[in-house]
Amino acid sequence: MKARLGIAPIAWWNDDLAELSDDVSLEECLRQASVAGFTGMETGRRFPMDMAELGPILKKYGISVCGGWFSGLLLDGTIETEKERIASQMAFFKSAGAPCIVYGETARSIQGIKSAPLATKPRLTESEIAAYGSKLSDFAAWCETQGMPISYHHHMAAAIETEEELDLLMKHSSVPLLFDAGHMAFAGGDMLRVIDNHHTRITHVHTKDIRRTVVDGLDRNKESFLDAVVKGAFTVPGDGSLDFEAIVKSCAHYGYEGWFVVEAEQDPRVSPPLEMAIKGHKELMRVMTAASYEVVQ
């Protein structure tokens, strides 16, 4: 089985917390990712959305676009509106040869509101999730016909956060799934059970690690998702509390082939991005070998 290793630029530039951003250029970010051993990077705010400009820079560092976030509003919006909103990113990702667009539902989400405690996240009934899942399925099917699939990102402080919420969404939709180990662990879910239950839907994997002592020490009635990020809730594989050998072996058991992407937002002054990228890549290579994956370019 084959796997590819990517990383997200959120370790260098945080789109929600400018103070957690390293003052480096796009080229320096790509250079560091390449030095660490990664061959893919998800997009970020300093990426030009034009392959005529971006292509030569990516080629210089041996990096390809391995995904990127789209702030979806389908929970409260219409499919036609979302088609219009995603059109430019879809065209760019197709020209870049990206595997998918990462769909993150931001309607009603409190993930970017520093004053909103984690406990105040949006909550949906099963009937509301069913209605949402129906729209998502239709939208995902349309994206597939356009040649650029989406992969749904369950996320802390969003409508679909917990294992139970994800189970319901999977039950009431046919949308492909992005499995994020760190977000599921933060939400209190059983990561291996999620893979067991939904492996046929997983099309993209984020290897986000957590620092368990930080996560368990949060006051969720007072502290927000962004507070947790500032405190260092997330880190790269090999620097946190999760057993990525077990996680990756589970993915391998079910025949997952595709990208494993490190996505770990941290304070670059405390956790230098290059140092963290090297550590994360080293750990992923260890567990890929243990799981009998062949890591390809």
Image (cartoon, rainbow, N blue to C red):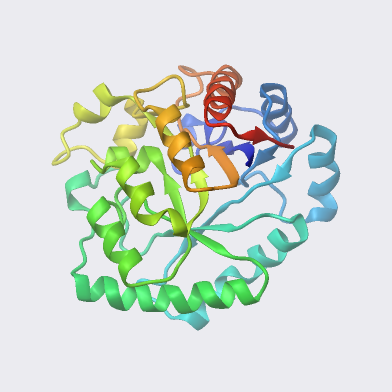
Residue at x 72% of width, y 63% of height: 94
Tell me: 107 left or right of 13.
left
Res. 60 image quadrant: top right
Residue 189 visible to an observer of this rendering: yes
Residue at x 54% of width, y 48% of height: 256
Q: Position of residue 78 (x, y in %)?
A: 43, 81
Q: Camera-side residue: 270 or 60?
A: 60
Res. 106 image quadrant: bottom left
Q: How many marks?
A: 0
Q: Position of residue 122 (x, y in %)?
A: 23, 59
Residue at x 50% of width, y 45% of height: 205
Residue at x 39% of width, y 39% of height: 181
Q: Tell me if residue 97 comes above or below residue 47 in the rendering.
A: below
Res. 124 image quadrant: bottom left
Residue 82 visible to an observer of this rendering: no
Q: Position of residue 112 (x, y in %)?
A: 37, 48
Tell me: 54 left or right of 124.
right
**Considering the image in quadrants, where does the C terminus appear?**
top right
**Considering the image in quadrants, where does the N terminus appear?**
top right
Q: Camera-side residue: 71 or 188?
A: 188
Q: Position of residue 57 (x, y in %)?
A: 81, 40
